[in-house]
Amino acid sequence: MPDPIDDIFGADGVLARHLPGYERRASQIDLARAVWRTLLAGDEEGQVGEAAMLVAEAETGIGKTLAYLAPAALCGQKVVISTGTLNLQEQLLDKDIPFVRRHIRPDLKAICVKGRQNYACLRRCQQLVAAPQLSLLAGGPELEALREWLGRTETGDRAELAWLADGSPLWEQVASQATKCLGGDCPQQAECFVTRLRQRAASAQVLIVNHHLFFSDLAIRRFGHAEVLPRYQSVIFDEAHHLENVATGYFGANFSHYQLLDLVKDVEALAQERLEKGARKATVQIARALATQAAEFAGLFPVARGRQSLPEVIAGIPDWEGEVNRLEQAIAGLARQLDQPGLTAEPWEGLRRRSQELKESLAATAGGFDSRYVYWAERRDKTVSLAAAPIEIAPALKQYLYRQAASIVLTSATLTAGGNFDYLFSRLGLPREAQTLRLPTPFDYPRRTRLYIPAAGFPEPSDPAYPPAAQEQALALLTASRGRALVLFTSMAAMRQMRDFLAPRLAHPLLMQGDAPKARLLDIFSRDTASVLLAVASFWEGVNVPGESLSCLIIDKLPFEVPSDPVIMARLNRIREEGGNPFADFQVPRAILTLRQGLGRLMRSPRDQGLLAILDIRLFSKGYGQTFRRSLPPSPVIRDLDGVRRFFQEYVK
């Protein structure tokens, strides 16, 4: 197949002719050509069982989405593009794919596939609209809006409902759920939004998904069937630095008290609707007995919210095996009742299947422990859950992904730590022969940015003097930058303490994560060029605020994870058992990747400029600081506040 890269990305190519403001970048061409060759290599005879693989770090500003989307559109294969954030999905769907259709491949069939809970169940919607009195949660305006939407929507995607709040009880009543699907017995099967989605996905060449859906589907394929995704040939993972964390959640097992109560509720509702008095009474009685047993089981666990090692929890429960056995028997008793003659229709079959799956999940999470897995219990507001996850995800990826796809591309702005791919290859079990590519940002960091790190003598984060010192430093930096800053924290407590300190002292509008939805906060922040936004967690990546509003990026300290999470602890212990250094081999690389993501929020366009600040002296006072520094952008370092003030006075007006 002829190489189309020059025709698209060359000096007189499609992008130069049709993309406003396009600048030819050798790094974008290198990435596009590498993706093209990887896709074609995977299509060659003899590649079955060994995917052609490309691992490409493409820093901000290269234009990586078009660099992989154009080859995917032209290669003639069915390609899945899996992303880590909603922002990137929206960019692909709203900007890049329409451009490719207009100028590169007019007949391209591309579709975004989400988990089925994002789509309305037509049967449940129509039931609610026809009998609103059966719901105490569907108020008049919402119900009327739902009715109007059903009359015009073609997809049933809840993303179309701008008026629907996150966590809406209304959506919980009408969302499509595998556990409540009637399958072939549903009178709305032909018009079903999920059925139609699968039909469109089967004929599409490019499927856009998120990592969670991809690995959910991949995990299900182990058992011979897929939930949503049709068979594909190649996969492109963007934001691939998330793969280990996301994949881990889908190759283990989960069991929750809430799932049992939800099953009991559905059994009772169907029994009231479908069964005669005698059978109804017996079925409801057995279901309620299970609910009682589930409540007793949940009561065994500590009341403190959060995750705890399951072996440690079990040590404080005198008859753990007996408690698990009593709950298993209660689940089995309900399953036997649902297997009675007369309960053979599809709804009952779905409930029986759920009972069996819950029994299996309980056995997998609470039974004999497998040394390859880590086990924990978690208490949330309304439920207790048990989970088991593989300590190492690499074996599952090798068996179920690398040997099944023809080609695999992993890309992100942050895949290396300390200047190499060693950490990524180790954690994901990537083959040594996988091609690697490092493409630095084209942005002019040396001239348009500075990196501020406090001078020697500044307290380290473990020092009690650190919080007040960091607060004073932040105030001085924000005064010099005249607001216009995003301040990122490693903890909610530190963020709130900084807010309390700055509020009476800062002469600029102060915003904080949690004051409003993320999208609303970012909208205010981007429009008010003097504001300061304090944030944690999700704001470390996926935030794109080009221009003057973000002229200063402050990070409070190096983002080391607290090793109290059972999965993290198990991985640290495994590295130690194998003779490695958990801190150097695991904690430092993970912190570097997170830090690089956070720092990447500053420069979003070639015209951006500003200050990067890390208020952590360990970058110079500790030996591992050198590894961190090798991973930082090539910004000239400033270590005094006078230098910061001069930079803003002379360069960032």
Image: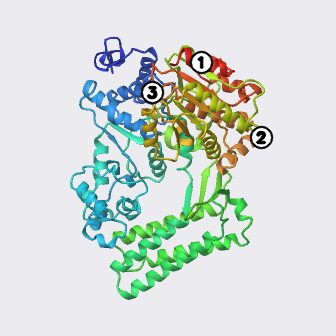
Name the kind of residue labelled 2 in the image.
Answer: Pro
Observer able to see residue 398: no
Query: Residue 575's x, y, as percent?
Result: 72, 40
Please provide percent x and percent y for residue 126.
Answer: 26, 64
Q: In this view, does 204 lie to the left or right of 615?
A: left
User: Which residue is the site of mark 1?
Assistant: 634
For marks 1 and 3, give the CA distance: 19 Å
At 28% from the left edge and 48% from the top edge, which residue is drawn?
199
- Seen as rendered, the residue at the extreme bottom is 278
- In the rendered picture of this protein, how many numbered marks are placed on residues? 3
Q: Is residue 603 above or below residue 469?
A: above
* Type of amino acid at the residue the image marks with label 1: Pro
Q: In which quarter of the image is the N terminus?
A: top left
Q: Is residue 11 left or right of residue 643?
A: left
Q: Which of 63 and 38 is in front in this view?
A: 63
Taking the image as drawn, is residue 392 in sight? yes
Residue that numbered label 2 is attached to: 464
- Residue type pointed to by label 3: Pro
x then y, percent, for residue 353:
44, 66
Nearer the observer: mark 2 or 3; the answer is 2
| Residue 184 lies in quadrant | bottom left
Residue 628: quarter of image: top right
Residue 461 position (above or below residue 122): above
Residue drawn at (30%, 39%), measured in percent from left and top?
204
